Amino acid sequence: MREIDKLPESYQTPLKQAIADASDLDNIKLVTADAQRLTKYLTNTSQVQAIAQRSVNIDLALEEL
């Protein structure tokens, strides 16, 4: 449940409902894994959006390597 609690409320509700509908161990593991992936996705999406909003000169960045 800790993974689910890290998500915004709009994502928590359906995941908690999925656990309430079928509270067997396999389903709980599946929903928890989904919550982990969703957390990573939302984090990565915000990072990509931040990068996309900046103008990045790829050629210059590669030359600096």
Image: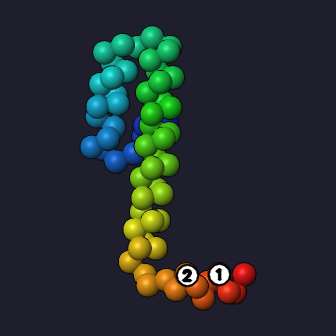
Q: Which residue is mark 1?
A: 62
The number of callouts visible is 2
The kind of secondary structure element at disc 1 is: helix
Residue 12 can be seen, yes or no: yes
Q: Amino acid at mark 1?
A: Leu
Q: Amino acid at mark 2?
A: Ile
- The alpha-carbon separation of the residues under discs 1 and 2 comes to 6 Å
Residue plotted at (33% across, 37% down): 12
Residue plotted at (32% across, 41% down): 11
Residue plotted at (47% across, 24% down): 30
Based on the displayed image, in which of its 4 quarters is residue 34 positioned? top left
Where residue 22 appears, as percent x and y from the top left, is 36, 13
- Position of residue 20 relative to residue 47, above or below, is above
- Is disc 2 surrounded by few (<14), some (14 to 19) or many (20+) residues within 10 Å? few
9 vs 31, left or right, is left
Dot label at residue 46 = none
The kind of secondary structure element at disc 2 is: helix
Foreground residue among 18 and 46: 46
Where residue 50 appears, as percent x and y from the top left, is 43, 72
Residue plotted at (44% across, 84% down): 55
- Is disc 1 surrounded by few (<14), some (14 to 19) or many (20+) residues within 10 Å? few
Q: Which residue is mark 2?
A: 58
Asked if disc 1 and disc 2 are in contact, CB closer than 8 Å, the reply is: yes
